[in-house]
Image (cartoon, rainbow, N blue to C red):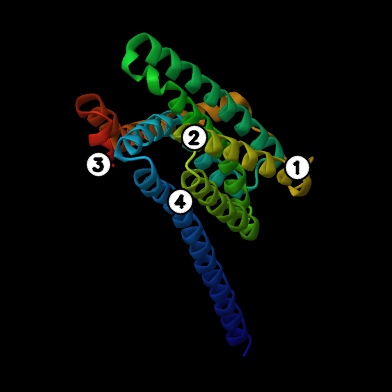
Amino acid sequence: MFRKTISNFLSAKRRRQLVGIVKEGAVVSVTEYVMLGSFVLVNFLINHFYGTESVGIYALSYSIAQIGILGIGSAYSLLMRRDLAIGQYDSRGYLAKVQSLRTGNLGLVLILTAAAIVLFYPALQINLLFILLMIAAKGFDALSESYYTAYQTLGRLTEYSVYKIANAVLFIGISIYVCASGFDIQYLYLSQAAFALLMFAINYFKWRKSGPASGLELVNPTYRLLLIESYPLMINAVIFQLGVRANNILVFDKLGEKDLGIFS
C-alpha cells in the first residue's frame, strides 16, 4: 500500500512537471513566432508603401545590425539561461553586468559601422543614417531581450509573454501607422528606434520595481568571467549570423537594393 502511494505521488509529480514543460514550450513558441512574424510583416508594408528598393535598404540595414548586435549579444542570453536557472548568482547583479556589456557592444557596433562605411564603403554613406538607426533599434531590442530571458528563466512566464507579445504588437502597430500615413521612410526607422528605446525603458523600470531582491548569500559574476565564458559562444554566433545575413550584403553589393529587396 505504501509503495503504491509513493508510486502514485511520483506519477502525479511527473505529470505536473510534464504539463509545466508543455505549457512553457507553448508560451515561448507562440511568443517567439509573434515576434519574428512582426519583422516579416514590416517587409511587406515597406514593399507596398515605399517600393522594393526600400525593402532592400531595410534588409541590408537589418542584416548589418543583426551581425553586430545579435552575433555578439546572443551569447549572453545563453549564459543567462544557464546561470540563472542554476540559481548560483544574484539575478539583479548578473543582469546589471550583462546590460553593461550589451550597452558597450551597442556603442562599439555603432562606431565601427560608421567608421567602416565612411572609410571603406562610400557608396553606403547615403544610407548611413538608416543603418545606424537600425543598429540602435536592434541594440535596444537586445537590452530588452535580457529582461525577457530573465523572466523566462526565472519562471515568470506571464511577464515574459505579455511584455514580449506587447512589444511585437505595438511594433507592428507603429509601423503600420507610419507607412499608412505616408510619412517619409526615414520616419519608419526613427519610430522603430524610438519604440525600441521606449520598450527598454519600460522593461528597465518594471525589472527594478518587481524584480527579485538581491540575495545576500548569492554572488555576482565578474565581467572577466562573463567575457571568458561567452567568447566561444560569440564566435559561433557571429559565424552563424554571417552565414545567414552575409548573402544580403553580397546581393546588395553586386546587384543593388532593388534586387536585394526581391531576394529578401
Q: Amino acid at mark 4?
A: Ser
> Does label 2 or label 4 sit earlier along the sequence?
4
> Does label 4 or label 1 sit earlier along the sequence?
4
Question: Is there a contact, CB below 8 Å, between mark 2 and mark 1?
Answer: no
Q: Is residue 178 left or right of residue 160?
A: left
Disc assigned to residue 208: 1
Q: For residue 222, what is the image quadrant?
A: top right
Question: Is there a contact, CB below 8 Å, between mark 4 and mark 1?
Answer: no
Rate crowding at label 1 as few (under 14), some (14 to 19) or many (20 or more) other CA atoms within 10 Å: few
Of residue 8 and residue 124, the one placed in the foreground of this image is 124
> Of tags 2 and 4, which is closer to the observer?
2
Question: Is there a contact, CB below 8 Å, between mark 1 and mark 3?
Answer: no
Give the residue number, with chain letter if any, for mark 3: 262
Q: Amino acid at mark 3?
A: Ile
Q: Amino acid at mark 2?
A: Tyr
> Of tags 1 and 3, which is closer to the observer?
3
Marks 2 and 4, how far apart at CA: 15 Å
Vertical position of residue 87 compared to residue 12: above or below: above
Q: Amino acid at mark 1?
A: Arg
